[in-house]
Image (cartoon, helix red, strand yellow):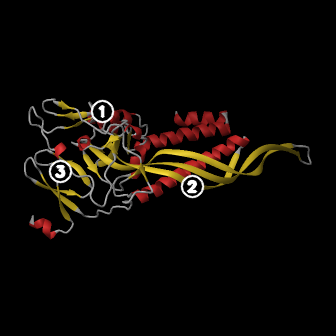
Amino acid sequence: MDGMNENSNMTQASTIKETDKKCPKCGGVMDFDPNIGAMACPYCGYEEEIVNEEGGSAAELDFESAEKTENCDWGAAKKQIICKSCGAETIYDALDVANECPYCGSNQVMEANDENTIAPGGVVPFAVSNEQASANFKAWIGKKFFCPKLAKQSAQPDAFTGIYLPYWTFDTDTFSRYSGKYGIDREVSSTDSEGNKTTNTVTDWHRTSGTYKLAIDDELVQGSERHDSAMLKGLEPFETEKNVPYKPEYVAGFVAERYSVGLKAAWEKAKNSISGKIKSNISSKIRSEYNADHVKDVKVSTTYSKITYKYLMLPIWCSSFKYNNKVYQFMVNGQTGKVYGKTPVSVGKIILVIAIVVAILAILLCGAGALNFISELFN
């Protein structure tokens, strides 16, 4: 305890009693099992249903009424957990809300909120097991054309880590006023002084304006900046409508993290994403209305109403594999099984594809003579 007093960033935290209990048959640590959607003992197979009295899914909360809206900069803050099973003291990052005791394997599910943060409203439970994630990974890397064959054959994922990451979702009604230009092509023929006819394409431009409405449901925003944002984006979509009200039993046996991107900052990110969708939809609307060939200079002004939000914990499997002494990370969507990540690239395959493309272009541009030349070159 003296070490805690010396470190002002250290706090004492306690675990949640619902996940401290052991298997009533053998005394083993019970975890959430994605295969059955319930608590299970990995030692004797005993199963126990998670009772959710609330039922349904996480409530939509009014954005304007929210009080805790700021980002949470946890910095180097830590917290100390004393395991109720073995008495060992373990130090965790302040962002962690679930982990395992490194000494006895007991679940360390901690209080997911404090006086300055919002508690999770819902969780999308793991539906994909680590065995399924591994099988999906093998199928995924097998389809990567530019990945070296040897890498495909030897790639074995390291032990998977199941982690619940924080996400915000937003619902809103939008009303937009827009203006822009659309162009319609027409062919114009002309004859030069020598009687040669030529045909050119001319675009006639017209102005347009109007209004557009769009209802947004569950616009997803990452609540953490500790992980590869592009990789997480590649795992989407999640079926967020299948969330259940948060209970600590769902995260037992997994790592879980609370948000650092606050509600206000998340809403700004959501608006940027929604604005892009609205502008794209309006461009398509203009093109369709006027049977236009081109659309440009679209300007949009949008108002948002009936804004609601949810704070959800979403499931992700994290792992990596090594090839030629380099580590390649990848992730698997713990709900849908979708895989996204990085793989090694075969330079030889890239050169071969470039050579084939060049050969095809040469044939198209130069005809049969080029085809004979290329044939002799490769022979």
User: Which amino acid type corresponds to the residue marked 1 in the rendered image?
Assistant: Gln
Which residue is found at the position 17% from the left and 38% from the top? 30
Which residue is found at the position 9% from the left and 67% from the top? 2
Left or right? Give the position of 127 relative to 173.
Answer: left
- Report if the CB atoms under discs 3 and 1 are less than 8 Å apart: no
The residue tagged 3 is 15
Crowd tier of the residue under label 2, counting other residues whose Cα lies within 10 Å: few below 14, some 14–19, many 20 or above:
few
Closer to the observer: label 3 or label 1?
A: 3
Q: Nearer the viewer, residue 133 or 361?
A: 133
Which residue is found at the position 68% from the left and 54% from the top? 179
Which image quadrant: the N terminus?
A: bottom left
Which residue is found at the position 37% from the left and 53% from the top? 223
Query: Which badge, 2 or 3, is on the more N-terminal residue?
Result: 3
The residue tagged 2 is 303
Query: Which badge, 3 or 1, is on the more N-terminal residue?
Result: 3
Left or right? Give the position of 143 relative to 250.
Answer: right
Judge whether residue 335 can be spotted in this image: yes
The residue tagged 1 is 132
- Report if the CB atoms under discs 2 and 3 are less than 8 Å apart: no
Q: Secondary structure at mark 1?
A: helix
User: Which amino acid type corresponds to the residue marked 3 in the rendered image?
Assistant: Thr
Q: Nearer the viewer, residue 45 or 348?
A: 45
Crowd tier of the residue under label 1, counting other residues whose Cα lies within 10 Å: few below 14, some 14–19, many 20 or above:
some
Residue 373 occupies quadrant: top right
User: Which amino acid type corresponds to the residue marked 2 in the rendered image?
Assistant: Thr
